Structures are given as structure tokens and as C-alpha cells.
Image (tube, grey):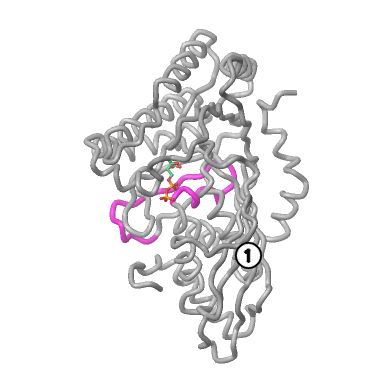
Amino acid sequence: MTPTDSPLPASLSALQDRLRDLRAQGQILLQNGDRGFGTAPSNIALIKYWGKHSDQQPQNSNLSLNLGSFRATTEVVVRGRFYPQGSAPALHSNTVLFAGMTEPAPADRKLDRWISRVFADWASEIRMHVRSENNFPSACGVASSAAGYAALAAAVADLLQLERHFSATELQTWLTEWARLGSGSAARSAIPGAAEFVAWERDDVDGSFAHPVPASPGFELGHCLLVLDTSPKSVSSSEGHEAARHSPFFAVRAAGMERRFRAMCAAVAAGDFSTVATLAEEDAFAIHAIMQTSEPASRHLDSRNSQIIARFVAGRDQARVPAFWTLDAGPNVHILFLREALPFVRDFLARECAGGGASVLWGGKGPGALPGSRARAVVHTDLPDDRAFRMGEPA
Ligand code: DP6
């Protein structure tokens, strides 16, 4: 553990203690070259996480749907090995190879710290080489850190064969908590379908986890992204969470947050589309009001996407179809809809893309974070189940 790290939440700490015991019993053995493999989806938040306490604790409860066809796949390879006395110094560094890189590079500070924490106090001589790629373009408004950290946690779970050592609930806790400690929104990517993260009022409370949200049977939302701009963000999400405190609207949003979050959970559970849509659009405006008045400000709601949103809302209201928009920490417009709105959504997108300078990516529902062979099945079969949910994909 580095001096800046807080203690782990008790539930995660108990699981880490189990890893120490498993090592002592010879049930976990790591050697140079051992591999683990995992995959996880990105997600789109309908009630967004914006602002965090120390150690990656989201300050407000939040809820998202995973985007099963926007996935990160990650392999971890052990550098180093266990020594009988367990006290050997680490001989290697953590390295990464991301898509587009020709040579491995040292892991950045955040990833380096994450890996050290996972192995702290029970396998500190172990380092890792991480290879990861996304099946969606980066900087397109689809949260790649969420997919990335959830896939990384799944790959480490596979390496340690946690499916053998932990119950399904323990494994989910381990995955969501380690994903959160990498990136707050990644906790939800460990969960299939709709996921909620219930935040607590104090920053040191144990027990804030991501959980599945029971959705009404048949309440299937299609998803697509109108891609307008893929330039990298000038203010990262991590900076944005911090900068948000300086906005006068931060406290205003926080005051009604729990009520709106509970209303959203209830609407998802009841399949109440119109409430889901109203709350999601309201929260998108609220978070962008904060972003625009933060220090430094992030201005993702600009004249181009504002006009697109206005045209979308006018057309949707006139056609009376179940569809809504949201914007994450980027300028690209997410559209979510029920199946009956598909013809409207297709026509709308065709018109918006007609002049050039915009394109469409179709998301969809799929599994959460998966370690090991189940991950390989998803990747190698190209998500056959998922196609059923990619309702917007042109025929
Ligand atoms: C706007 O999870 O990317 O996408 O915890 O600093 O990695 P870090 O931030 P991140 O923030 C996500 C913000 C958001 C809303 C959301 O997904 O809930």
C-alpha cells in the first residue's frame, strides 16, 4: 500500500485476507508468464456519477445500462514469481500494451498504483504486463475507463481463479470494488444489464457497492451514439469530478439526488419509460450545467449538439415515440429507445448524418465483466446473444 491509500473497505479487505490464506495454503500459485483473461462492457449512465469522495467513492448514487457491444478485452501476464518465504523484492515493473502501441510501455501512475494495491500485503513481489483493447473507438463518448478497469479486474480474477475460491456474490463484490477503485463508473460495468451504485453520505462507509437493478421484464432499451467529435477531452473525468465542487449548481443537484435516483430505480423496475426518459434528460442537463460552471469548466453541451438535441426532442414529441437522449462527459449524443421508436430513430440519424461530419455507433445489452473461459466465449463468438438487443443496427 502506498502512503496515500486509504484502507480498503472491510468487505474487500476480508476477501484480500482470503487471498493471503489461499497463498499460504498453496492454493494460489503465481509464476512468471501465468495469464488471465477478461472482458467487460462500457455503460451509459442515466443518473450520472459526478463528484467523488476520497478513494474513488462516488458522491451520489448512480445508475446505468451496460453497452454489451462496446467491450474491453484484457489479458494480464505475471512478471515475477512467488518465493517460498514470500518476502522477495519485486524484480519487474508493471507494463502495458494497448491497441495501437508497437512496444510495451511502463504502466501509468494510476494503473501502477491499482496493481500494487491488488497485490499489496499478500503478493507484493508480483508485477503484471497488461494487454488491452477495445472493440469501439476511443474518445467517442463511450466510457473506455469503465470497460477497461472492469475488464482488468476480470482478467486478474481469472489469473487468480477466483471463480473456484469465492462464491458468486463474493466474486461480484471483488470485481465491482476493484473496478471502482480504478474508475468509479467501472463498478457498474462489472454487472450485466442495468446496474446501480448506491452511494453513502459519508466517504468512509463500507458497503457502497454496485448491484444489478431489477428491470421490468420486456423493458429493453435500444441504444446508439451519434458521433460528432472524437477529439480527446480537455478536462479528464477525474479532474471534472474535482472541478465540479466549484460549481454553484453542484449542491443544488446533490440536494435532490437521492430522490431522483430512487425514482429512476423504481421506474426501471416498473418499465415506466416516460419517467425513465424524463429523469435521464433532466440529469443530463443538470450534470452539464455543473460542468459548464466548474473550475475549470468543461463545455460538452455546445451549439451543435444543442441544436441536434432540440431537433430530436421536437421530432420525438411530434411523432410521440418512446426515445430520449443523454450526454456523458463528451459532445456525442446517446439515444435510447424502445423498439417501436426504431423507425423514427433511424430516420433522425440518417438526416443528421446526411451532411457528413457525423456517424453512428450502435450499442446494446450484454453480459457484465467476465473472467476466463466465459470471456473467451463472448469475444470469440462476437456476442451472438447481443445481436438481438442491437435493435437499431441497420438491416
Ligand atoms: C460522466 O468513472 O470516468 O461518465 O472515477 O475519475 O475514473 P473516474 O471517473 P469516471 O466518471 C464517469 C462520469 C460520467 C457519468 C457516469 O458514468 O456515471
Extreme residue toward the bottom, this view? 85
Front residue of 184/388: it is 184
Q: Is residue 372 above or below residue 42?
A: below
Closer to the camera, 231 or 325? 231
Taking depth in this image into account, of 53 and 95 the one nearest to the observer is 95
- Kindly identify the residue that appears in the image at 29 percent across and 44 percent down: 243
Quarter the N terminus occupies: bottom left
How packed mark 1 is, by other alpha carbons closer than 10 Å (few <14, some 14-19, many 20 or more), is: many
Q: Residue at x 73, y 40 (%)?
A: 385
For badge 1, the amino acid type reads: Val
Q: Is residue 333 above or below residue 348?
A: below
Q: Secondary structure at mark 1?
A: strand
Q: Residue drawn 62% across and 41% down?
A: 136
What residue did someone put label 1 on? 76
Q: Position of residue 49 (x, y in %)?
A: 39, 43
Please give the range of residues in magenta: 184-206
Q: Residue at x 51, y 25 (%)?
A: 273
Q: Residue furthest front?
A: 102
On the rendered structure, is 350 left or right of 88? Answer: right
